[in-house]
Amino acid sequence: FCYLSSMAPLSSSFISVGELLRIFNVRALKNLSQNFLLDSNVTDKFVKYAGKVKNSVVVEVGGGPGTLTRSIIKQNPRKLVVIERDRRMIPLLQILEDKSPEMVKVVHGDALSFDYNSIVNEENVRLSSLSSGSSKDDTDFHIIGNLPFNIASPLLFQYLEMMANRKSVFSQAHPHLTLCFQREVGNRMLAPVRTRERGRISVMCQLYADVKQAFIIPSRSFTPPPKVEGMVLTLSPRVDPPKELEEISYKEVETFVRKGFQSRRKRLRHNMIRLDGLEECADEFLSENGFPAETRAPNLTSDQWLHLAIAYKRKMEKINSLDETKQPGNK
């Protein structure tokens, strides 16, 4: 280990990640949904799509054995915080921290409970607000990661809620996210209306974020090769969100959309009648808001889903208000 630590950081003689995995006898675990990216050409391309990383602050989600970490280091961020849950990976990542202690910080922890605000404060992240001219090169804060497939969706929805509520780092800065998902998940995130892939994840991503496909990673690039390909996407808070979002919480929208897609192949009315207050009037509710009874969930745009969610919220507020006036003691 001392020999490894004495080597020049990321030089041509620096020991490869594959060799480190053999030395430490570390293998990808199926129960952690681990598929390592060991090809530096792929990880260099990954970081390229993140935009201007030099002199910025980067959080890497799921550092794994460190191939993507090395590609980020080569771009000279002023600070790189690597979050890794698997304790077996920490010694491999610690080698990189030991060589660049001012730049790299390895955190053994869970990305789902990580305090991003602590990094903003500790590293004096340049604060920025959303504007029509914002781009991935304007931000001082990046989140990059080859996400373990088992936490990719929960983490995505957490980021979307943080964007919507301007919570944590999203309340102070304009972070740019460059993340790898299963290709199937990526297709669903990008899916336009009237497509088979369109669902709750499509609506929520497109309502709260600007989402773009970067590139496809073939399954053979992972170790071990999964049965599916990977897709790298970039996300950032939407610069032109509908003003109507101020009228309704993220949780209210997500709950409504999730229930609206419960039986995605059926007409929307079949899902609406399952909602409180619409058991007897789903057709009327849809008609009042400009949608015929035969409308199907995938055929609505994200803005149309927002319109329906707000209409449902107002309807329930009216129903609840009427119920309160009927309570004993109220006139």
Image (cartoon, rainbow, N blue to C red):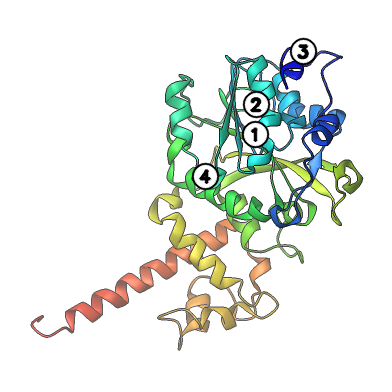
17 w.r.t. 228: above or below = above
Q: Secondary structure at mark 4?
A: loop
Q: If you read the primary sequence from the N terminus, does the residue marked by circle 4 or circle 1 appear first?
A: 1
Q: Nearer the viewer, residue 216 or 91?
A: 91
Quickly name the residue at label 1.
Answer: 90
Q: Disc 3 on helix, strand or loop?
A: loop
Which labelled disc corresponds to residue 241? 4
Q: Earlier in the sequence, mark 1 or mark 3?
A: 3
Residue in the image at 65% along x and 51% along y: 152
Tag count:
4
**Mark 4 crowdedness (10 Å alpha carbons): few <14, some 14-19, many ≥20:** some
Q: CA distance from mark 3 to mark 2?
A: 13 Å
For this rendering, which residue is in front, 229 or 242? Answer: 229
**Mark 3 vs 4, N-terminal side:** 3
First of labels 3, 2 by sequence position: 3
Rounded to the nearest angstrom, the CA distance separating label 3 from label 4 is 49 Å
Q: For mark 3, does the 10 Å Cα neighbourhood hold few (<14), some (14 to 19), or many (20 or more) residues?
A: some
Residue that appears at 56% across and 67% down: 258
Q: Real-space Cα distance between discs 4 and 2?
A: 41 Å
The residue tagged 3 is 7
In the image, which disc is placed on residue 94? 2
Give the quarter of the figure containing the N terminus.
top right
Amino acid at circle 2: Gln
Q: Amino acid at mark 1?
A: Ile
Q: Please rate how many residues cluster around mark 1, counting C-alpha atoms within 10 Å: few if below 14, some from 14 to 19, many from 20.
A: many
